[in-house]
Amino acid sequence: MAVSLRATGTTSEEASASSARDYVTLMKPNVMQLVVFTGAVGLFMAPGGLHPLLAAITLLAILAGAGASAAINNWYDADIDVRMARTRNRPTANGRIAPEDALGFGVVLSILSVMVLGLATNWLAAGLLAFTIGFYVFVYTMFLKRRTPQNIVIGGAAGALPPVVAWAAVTGSVGILPILMFLIVFLWTPPHFWALALYRSGDYAKVGVPMLPVVAGAETTRNHIFWYTVVLGAVTLAPVLTGQLGWIYGLLAAGLSAEFIRRAFNLRQTRSDVAAMRLFRFSIVYLFAVFVAMIVDRIVPAVLP
């Protein structure tokens, strides 16, 4: 082995680093950023608070749970990932990580994340994390994704649960605000992924994944995106109407939602792949910004005289 590494000009340290990077890639770090961020906002907004060390462990467990789900998803979808332009460079698709190694990594990481969260905080939070992982793996990945165009609609519940998990870690219960946070992410997920699916519909059609543009066509998908953004905009105001958040959040959320709806309407009118990709990218900014608005709403009144 040492000889072959010299022959290729690669040191053992570089080989190890490459392997570590592959496992990070396996966990879909771009997706994990959103998951951890929404979980962090759930921690911040929950009454009472956690010791900083326990808060860090909670976020680490949520991150590990999301990464474990992604690793198992990569194992299960390796056969179609290799045929899609967007996913063919995933470690399990191009052979950098064997599918069975991805599965083992994901299963071990799943168990560890749930156990650590339960021991560090409480078993309600751990149970919700276990449900999140199981729902993503068994319901979305193995059952829905290749069978129904509603895959993203139903499967989005898994990605929407981190704020609820984090809130439960702090309080040992689930309140109105984390449920509304769940609904915001849940309703955001379909227009976010359908915008990408419009742009990549040929990829999905090639491997037989029944995403909405493949099954119902681009026109129907654009209509669905628009009306989902309208409903999402209304739901983002629910925390104000229920008294959970104040006018600062309400103004920011209303402005962000108005822009999201405007872009969705523009996509409906222009029927452009470029507009679809721009909407997809804006949707990421939108979700981050709505959750930042929650923090701002909590901080600003506290520091003003």
Image (tube, rainbow, N blue to C red):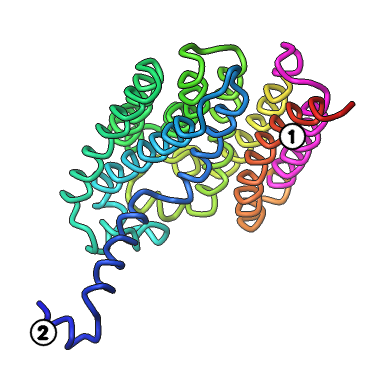
Q: 19 or 255: which is nearer to us? A: 19
Residue 277 % position (x, y): 60, 54
Point 59% across, 32% down: residue: 41
Q: Which amino acid does label 1 sit on?
A: Ser
Point 44% across, 41% down: residue: 211
Q: What residue type is labelled 2?
A: Val
In this rendering, would 144 be left or right of 246?
left
In this rendering, would 89 be left or right of 228?
left
Determine whether label 2 and label 1 are within 8 Å by CB: no
Residue pointed to by mark 2: 3
Mark with earlier residue (2, 1): 2
Point 34% across, 30% down: residue: 133
- Dominant SS of magenta comes to helix
In terms of secondary structure, where does tag 1 sit?
A: helix
In terms of secondary structure, where does tag 2 sit?
A: helix
Quick check: 25 above or below 136?
Answer: below
Separation of marks 2 and 1 at Cα, in angstroms = 59 Å
Q: Give the range drawn in magenta.
A: 239-267
Q: In which quarter of the image is residue 90?
A: bottom left
